[in-house]
Image: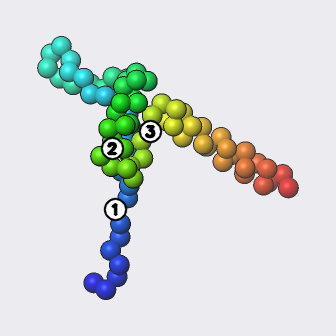
Amino acid sequence: MFGRKKKAPEPVYDVTQKIAKTWWGGTKLVPTTKSEQKKMKAEILKRNPNATVLDSKAKKQRELEWIDCIEEFDAFMND
């Protein structure tokens, strides 16, 4: 009632895959090319400049963050 309104979190878009129609009328996710990722990223950032876009490079980096956390923890425990 008297508290501040919470801001909605910034949206996260994954441009590494796109939806494609199958032969029998269904849909499936297929990988996108680097040029398609660039186009999709530019369009998303044009519409929403505060959005976070995950392309293949950012996705690989995000997947490997857990290794950095383990190395930091190991260094902390060795001291």
Residue flagged by tag 1: what amino acid is it? Ala
Q: Residue 56: give its label.
A: none
Q: Quadrant of residue 8?
A: bottom left
Frontmost residue, 56 versus 50: 50
Residue flagged by tag 2: what amino acid is it? Lys
Rendered residue at 29%/46% (across/down): 47
Rendered residue at 39%/29% (across/down): 37
Residue 39: horizontal and vertical position, in percent? 35, 30
Q: Nearer the viewer, mark 3 or mark 2?
A: 2
The residue labelled by disc 2 is: 46
The residue labelled by disc 3 is: 54
Q: Quadrant of the C terminus?
A: bottom right
Q: Residue 8: give its label.
A: 1
Q: CA distance from mark 3 to mark 2?
A: 15 Å
Residue 44: horizontal and vertical position, in percent? 33, 41
Residue flagged by tag 3: what amino acid is it? Leu
22 over 50 or under it: above or below: above
Element carrying mark 2: helix
